[in-house]
Amino acid sequence: MVQSAWKSFTRIFPTPGTVDRYEKMRACAGALFGLVLTGLCSYFILGKDIHAAWLIAPMGASSVLLFAVPASPLAQPWSIMGGNILAAIIGVTCAKMIDEPILAAGVAAALAIGAMFAARCIHPPSGAVALTAVLGGPAVHAMGYNFVLIPVALNSALLLITALFYNNATGRRYPHRPLPPDNANKHNTKDVAPTERIGIAPEDLDAVLTRYNQVLDISRDDLEAIMLQTEMQAYRRRLGETVCAAVMSRDVVTAEFGTTLAEAWTILQEHDLTALPVIDRGRHVIGIVTKADFLKHAELEPHEGLTERLKHLITPSMLSHTEKHEVVGQIMTKEVLTADENQSILDLVPLMSDSELHQVPVIDDRGRLVGMISQTDMIAALYEHSLTSNYIKP
């Protein structure tokens, strides 16, 4: 009985948060930094005669959004500037036109919310700005519409500037805009990336949000990213953790920076490969050379044949000084995506499907090359998982 009552009582509390101690400390320090700096700057700009107008109370609520949840749509620059300024204008107007303070406060808050919806700048502390304009007392009323610029617009701008600096300096992207997709269709066709053709589609999310019909304190793009990552996490849990070391090819054919182009091309042909990882003496990956690199540097022209251009590219010039490419290091791709040997193979699915990587070098904890994973290896591993999960014992 007591245990049941305790469970019912604990349900009124929210579930524990998922942020770590560093993030909590970062948010608290940001509010301290932002409000103190905003207050000091306002003091030096406005002088000593305005006193309480250096910093208005709603800035405390704005600091919670700007520093604790900078990814929220409610915390973006247009939200704080547009929301606070609109609310201040409406609040001052209601204070002048409606004699009853309680009625004026309610009307000001309601109209401020409607205006923020219309201007797409919803910022919860702006409701407090509207009330401050109505209930702030004779000093605020004496300011009239000057209250909109000083202190509301001034405080909002100063707090926004500190949030821009502090959030980016502490590793939080602000303003929080969606990152450009790194899996865009490279063929310039209307098809979406392969990983987006199955599972949750953007149209599905849009339809659900339309039916939900409520304001969310998270952007649509962030919500979609979280759902896709959750889908991948669930897929990983169902299939188990197969790491790269379990499926990679270990007998890796490699090249070095000084390997001649003729030798590298011969290796590619003899082993029927499309790419060679390029390593240094410590077996650290410094690049990768593919058949596509050879074709690109062969500078094919419409009137010339492929064989002639490739032959010219890989044939040594036999000169001590030449601008012609002679070794692998001169044509290799230096920016190489690698995988850790203990990394899940599911992490490589977007790379190989959307980014169209045909093979990925695998390194150990010391950064040394220990294997290669190709699309063929991935297909075999995923096929084996499919057979295992679908197998039913008689």
Image (spheres, grey):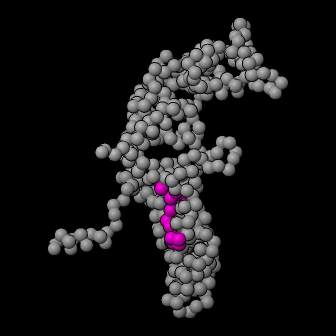
Q: Residue furthest front?
A: 394
Percent of width and height locating residue 344: 42, 39
At horizontal 41% and vertical 28% (from top left) the residue drawn is: 364
- Does the rendering let one see residue 72? no
Q: How many marks?
A: 0
Percent of width and height locating residue 143: 60, 79
State which quadrant residue 17 falls in: bottom left
State which quadrant residue 130 falls in: bottom right
- Does the rendering let one see residue 1? yes
Question: In the image, is residue 191 above or below residue 124?
Answer: above
Q: Residue furthest right?
A: 303
Residue in the foreground of this view, choosing between 348 and 133: 348
Percent of width and height locating residue 178: 58, 54
Q: Residue furthest left?
A: 1
Residue in the foreground of this view, choosing between 128 and 172: 172
Residue in the foreground of this view, choosing between 31 and 188: 188
At horizontal 58% and vertical 86% (from top left) the residue drawn is: 95
Q: Is residue 130 magenta?
A: no
At horizontal 61% and vertical 15% (from top left) the residue drawn is: 266
The C terminus lies in quadrant? top left
Question: In the image, is residue 39 above or below residue 183?
Answer: below
Q: Which residues are magenta?
A: 211-227
Percent of width and height locating residue 269: 61, 18
Question: In the image, is residue 188 above or below residue 208?
Answer: above
At horizontal 18% and vertical 69% (from top left) the residue drawn is: 3
In the image: residue 369, left or right of residue 313: left
Q: Is residue 222 magenta?
A: yes
The N terminus lies in quadrant? bottom left
Question: In the image, is residue 14 above or below residue 143?
Answer: above
